[in-house]
Every structure is written in structure tokens, then in C-alpha cells.
Image (spheres, rainbow, N blue to C red):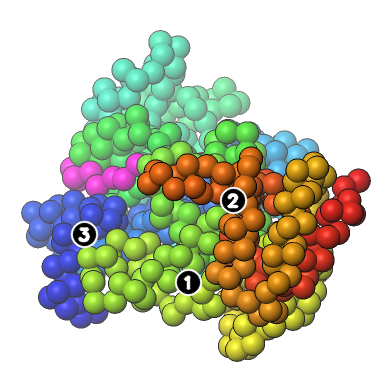
């Protein structure tokens, strides 16, 4: 891909985090003189892929794209599945935990699939789910299976090198372990020829020249195994370093839970004769209870669940923003993410010709430098949620009837994103907003203000603009107890006025700009809504 000199110059100076990481990588490859660059992401298929998995691939892709703006070197992204790891515990979210119980500690690709037929193993099933997801989003990647790499011999030469450097690796690992673990530790984990399980046992003999290790098997007999051809695997920390060395990985990001181990991975990679890759450590996602999301627990929010209520672009934005801050990843973050994406997309069009600003805009990174044109500015997801609230409908046609009256030029055929947002808003309203709605009755003073608001809005013609309606809302709200003194000394309207409107009229604690909502819902309908609230129709 040809990059203009102006774009390359802007990329080399941009403060957006993917460009900052790409510049570190650029220094590395310029020093080494290498001819290509390998990005890697890791996946542990002990459970179904979750949003954190997607985030790692999406963020790595953003750094990869940023790097391509700075360098003409070809790049690859390898998504590596650690599917040869032993199943150390049974995930909470599988259909039948008892089905998996006899297969504890076997490699994940040797564990039967609890989801039924169609895949060779549990590991193969989870790998397929990962690939399906990555393919759906159009990621440019190569999939790699640890089982395939070990069994095919791709790691054989480096495994022999591990035996040659066995003591040096032990010298790195042993100080990190307790006394009991030190006594039995080995970086090499044989797979039992009798039970098929991954064994955590000490080595009785390590023969680098023969390429073998000797250990006591589960039946009490001493066994000598060739380390090649998938008969052993490495402990996860040495495995990190070995894989980096074997594949010559240049960049890999991982969660904060790996941060303290990163120096160990680096040392082992360097012991094996290869410079460690560049890293980027991101914060972990939390569920609604503030706990780290986990594949085996299935807590937090799944990929498919997010996509039930919002589009993938909003998810990509959530991944882009502040990756080094811990963030809740639950259903209540979705509406804001959708609206922020639209706001950034609208801003991008106004930044045309300003490369520095465009490269700082998240949509540049989400869409690999080619964001789409925005649709229907002003019709936010929050606004559509409130429309769904008052319309109380599951029918997109009902929602579109309001939209077309407000903006006759809009149509599902020419506004596909808006049409999808209408569907998302209906589903989100039905599943989350409607069950949680809690209207309250207006007190006497609030009722007087609402009557005045109904009269003020009712004085406007149907089709009044959001600004005209909002002016009336402010005009009525500029009374006690809703007045507040602004910084310039003028009298403004306190947030308590708008909070009251949302609580009494919509049964919610907050909402969109009221004038925009009323314009979309219609002047006459808004007046009727206020009158119904005053009659107490919403309070039960």
C-alpha cells in the first residue's frame, strides 16, 4: 500500500497510542534490519472466546495498521491458540460438567467436545468459535494451533535447544517458585503415554543430544520420551519464551495479569538466542460486580451478547479507548459506546484535511484509515431508546413512522446503519430498560411546572425544531427550585429540572436532550405524554 509523505509524517508524530507503540516497533526492526514483521496474539481455549479475546486482536490490528503507515515492511498477524494445554479445571459454562470430569489434565485437543458432534475435540470446537468470530469481523490474520505446531515438528528444533539450555531456564524459573514447587518443577511437561494427561513431574534425566527426557509415569514406571513430535509440551511461562524464539515474534500484547511474568518470558526467549518482542500491557475488563471477566466463568458480557444490542463498531471503539485503564464490560456500557462512536464518526468528516486530528480520532483506527460516511446525525442511540420507551413497541415500522415524520428524507433503504440501530434500541429497551423502569409521581410544585411545560410545548407547531422545543423547556425550567447561577453570573436551569422530567415522564434517571426527544416523538405526542404522567397513568 502506498502511503503519502504527508500521511507518513503525521503517523510518525501522532500521539494516538497505536502510533506510539508502532514507533517503538519501528526502532526495533530498523536496528535488526529484518525484512518482515510478525505480530502475535494468544488465546487459551479453556473456554469460549470472550470480548477480551476480541479486544486483543482488534488492538493488535490497530498497532499493525499504524506500523504500516510508517514502514513498507510486510507484516503478518498470527493468532495462536494454546490448545495443547491440559484442562486443569472444568469450565462453569459448559453443558455437562460431568461429561468432562474424566478428561481433566488432558490436552484440550484430546478432550471430547461437550457441545455435541461436529468437532474433533473441545479445543477444536473453541478454536472454531474463535475463527468464526474473527472471520465475521474481517480481521486479517493467520490461525495457529499449538497442537499442530508441536505435533508437526514446527517447534522440534527449539525444543532441542530448550534441552540444551535446560539448566539456564531452570535458573530463571526456580527463584520464582516456592520450596515445594521447586522440588518437582520441570519446564518440560511430558504427556503420559498411558493416560494421555499432561504431567507436572520432575525430570530424572535430560538428554539434549538424544532429544529425550526421562520421568516417572503415572503407573510408577520410568519412561523416556523424545521431546519432538508433540510428545511433550512446555510449562506456560517457558512456552511463551520458546514460542517467541521459535517464531521470531516482534510484537505481542497481553493483559495486566501477565505483566509480572513478562520479564521471565523475555529472559527465556533471549536464553534461546532470540531478542524478546515488543510488548503492550493492557488493563483487564471487569464484570458488573467488578470481577475480572473469565472464559471459564463466562461472566461479563459475551461477544454475541454485545452484538445483540449494538454494532461491532461500538465494540471496537470500546476497545480503542484507554486500554490501560480497567473498565467495566457489561450491558450498561453499550448505549454510551454506540453514541460515542457516532460522535467520533461525525467529527471525522469535519477534520478533513487535518491529518493530525484524523489520526487521533478513534474511527481512523477502527476502520483502518477509511471510515464510512456518517448517517442521520442527531438520531442517537439514547434518543432511539427513549423513543422505544414511549412507543413501547417491538415493531421497527412503528419506530420508523416517528423517524420519517421527524425527518421525511430518511428511510431504512438509504440509512442501513440507522435501521440497525432502531432494531438494537428495541431489543435493548425490551431486555434492560423496560424491566428497570421506575416512574414516580410529580409533587404539587412539579405538577404546576409540567402543566406549564405542556402549554409551552403545545404552543409550538408540529414539526418544531429541537432547538425551538429546548428553548421552551429552558424557559419553563428557569424557576425555583430549578434555577442555578452560572459561572458568568447569569441564571441557568439546574440539572434537577431535567432529572425530574426523565423520572416522571420516562421512568429513568437520565436521558437525551429533551428537545431532541420531543421533536422526534412529536409536539402533540409529547404534550399527551406529559398529560398522561400528570394523571398518574405511569405510576403503579
The image quadrant that residue 2 belongs to is: bottom left
Taking 40 as reference, is 87 above or below it? above
Circle number at residue 138: 1
Of labels 3 and 1, the one closer to you: 3
Residue 19 in the image: x percent, y percent?
Answer: 24, 58
Q: Which residue matches tag 2? A: 478
Of labels 2 and 1, the one closer to you: 2
Q: Are marks 3 and 1 in contact (CB under 8 Å)?
A: no
Q: Mark 3 packing: few (<14 Cα in 10 Å), some, or many (20+)?
A: many
- State how many labels appear: 3
Question: Magenta stretch?
Answer: 273-281
Mark 1 or mark 3, which is nearer the start of the sequence? 3
Give whichever of 2, 451 is nearer the camera: 451
Residue at 43% x, 71% y: name it. Answer: 346
Distance in Å between CA atoms under marks 3 and 2: 45 Å
Residue at 69% x, 67% y: name it. Answer: 457
The image quadrant that residue 46 belongs to is: top right
Q: Which residue matches tag 3? A: 14
Residue 353 at least partly seen:
yes
Give whichever of 498, 225 is nearer the camera: 498
Mark 1 or mark 2, which is nearer the start of the sequence? 1
Mark 2 or mark 3, which is nearer the start of the sequence? 3
Of labels 3 and 2, the one closer to you: 2
Taking 290 as reference, is 519 above or below it? below
For this view, does 340 lie left or right of residue 245? right
SS assignment at label 3: loop
Task: Report the quarter where the N terminus lies.
Answer: bottom left
Amino acid at each position: 500500500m502506498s502511503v503519502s509523505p504527508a500521511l507518513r509524517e503525521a503517523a510518525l508524530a501522532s500521539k494516538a497510542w497505536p502510533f506510539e507503540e508502532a514507533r517503538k516497533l519501528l526502532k526495533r526492526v530498523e536496528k535488526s534490519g529484518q525484512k518482515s514483521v510478525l505480530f502475535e496474539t494468544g488465546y487459551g481455549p479453556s473456554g469460549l472466546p470472550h470480548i477480551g479475546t476480541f479486544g486483543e486482536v482488534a488492538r493488535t490490528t490497530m498497532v499493525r495498521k499504524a506500523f504500516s503507515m510508517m514502514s513498507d515492511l510486510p507484516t503478518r498477524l498470527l493468532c495462536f491458540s494454546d490448545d495443547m494445554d491440559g484442562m486443569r479445571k472444568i469450565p462453569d459454562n459448559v453443558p455437562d460438567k460431568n461429561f468432562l470430569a474424566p478428561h481433566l489434565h488432558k490436552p484440550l485437543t484430546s478432550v471430547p467436545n461437550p457441545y455435541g458432534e461436529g468437532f474433533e475435540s473441545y479445543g477444536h470446537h473453541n478454536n472454531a468459535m474463535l475463527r468464526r468470530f474473527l472471520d465475521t469481523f474481517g480481521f486479517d490474520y493467520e490461525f495457529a494451533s499449538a497442537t499442530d505446531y508441536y505435533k508437526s515438528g514446527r517447534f522440534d528444533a527449539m525444543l532441542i535447544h530448550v534441552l540444551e539450555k535446560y539448566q539456564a531456564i531452570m535458573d530463571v524459573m526456580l527463584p520464582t517458585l516456592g520450596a515445594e514447587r521447586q522440588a518437582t518443577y520441570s519446564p518440560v511437561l511430558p504427556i503420559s503415554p498411558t493416560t494421555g494427561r499432561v504431567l507436572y513431574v520432575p525430570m530424572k534425566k535430560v538428554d539434549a543430544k538424544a532429544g529425550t527426557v526421562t520421568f516417572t509415569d503415572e503407573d510408577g514406571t520410568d519412561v523416556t520420551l523424545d521431546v519432538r513430535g508433540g510428545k511433550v509440551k512446555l510449562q506456560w511461562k517457558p512456552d511463551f519464551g520458546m514460542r517467541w524464539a521459535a517464531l521470531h515474534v516482534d510484537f505481542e500484547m497481553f493483559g495486566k495479569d501477565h505483566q509480572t511474568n513478562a520479564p521471565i518470558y523475555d529472559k527465556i526467549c533471549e536464553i534461546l538466542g532470540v531478542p524478546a518482542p515488543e510488548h503492550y500491557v493492557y488493563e483487564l475488563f471487569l464484570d458488573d460486580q467488578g470481577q475480572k471477566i473469565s472464559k471459564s466463568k463466562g461472566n461479563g458480557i459475551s461477544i454475541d451478547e454485545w452484538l445483540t444490542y449494538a454494532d461491532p463498531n461500538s465494540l471496537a471503539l470500546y476497545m480503542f479507548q484507554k486500554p490501560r485503564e480497567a473498565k467495566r464490560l457489561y450491558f450498561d456500557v453499550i448505549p454510551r459506546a454506540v453514541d460515542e462512536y457516532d460522535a467520533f464518526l461525525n467529527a471525522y468528516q469535519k477534520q478533513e484535511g487535518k491529518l493530525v486530528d484524523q489520526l487521533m480520532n478513534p474511527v481512523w483506527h477502527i476502520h483502518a484509515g477509511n471510515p464510512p460516511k456518517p448517517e442521520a446525525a442527531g438520531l442517537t442511540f439514547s434518543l432511539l431508546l427513549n423513543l422505544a420507551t414511549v412507543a413501547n413497541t417491538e415493531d421497527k415500522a412503528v419506530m420508523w413512522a416517528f423517524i420519517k415524520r421527524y425527518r421525511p428524507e430518511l428511510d431504512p433503504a438509504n440509512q442501513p446503519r440507522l435501521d440497525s440501530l432502531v432494531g438494537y434500541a428495541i431489543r435493548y429497551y425490551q431486555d434492560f430498560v423496560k424491566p428497570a423502569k421506575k416512574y414516580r409521581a410529580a409533587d404539587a410544585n412539579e405538577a404546576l411546572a409540567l402543566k406549564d411545560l405542556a402549554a409551552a410545548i403545545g404552543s409550538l407547531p408540529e414539526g418544531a425544531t429541537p432547538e425551538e422545543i429546548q428553548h421552551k423547556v429552558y424557559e419553563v425550567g428557569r424557576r425555583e427550585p430549578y434555577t442555578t447561577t452560572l459561572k458568568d453570573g447569569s441564571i441557568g436551569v439546574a440539572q434537577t429540572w431535567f432529572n425530574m422530567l426523565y423520572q416522571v415522564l420516562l421512568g429513568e434517571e437520565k436521558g437525551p436532550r429533551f428537545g431532541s426527544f420531543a421533536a422526534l416523538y412529536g409536539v402533540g405526542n409529547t404534550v399527551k405524554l406529559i398529560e398522561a404522567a400528570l394523571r398518574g397513568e405511569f405510576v403503579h
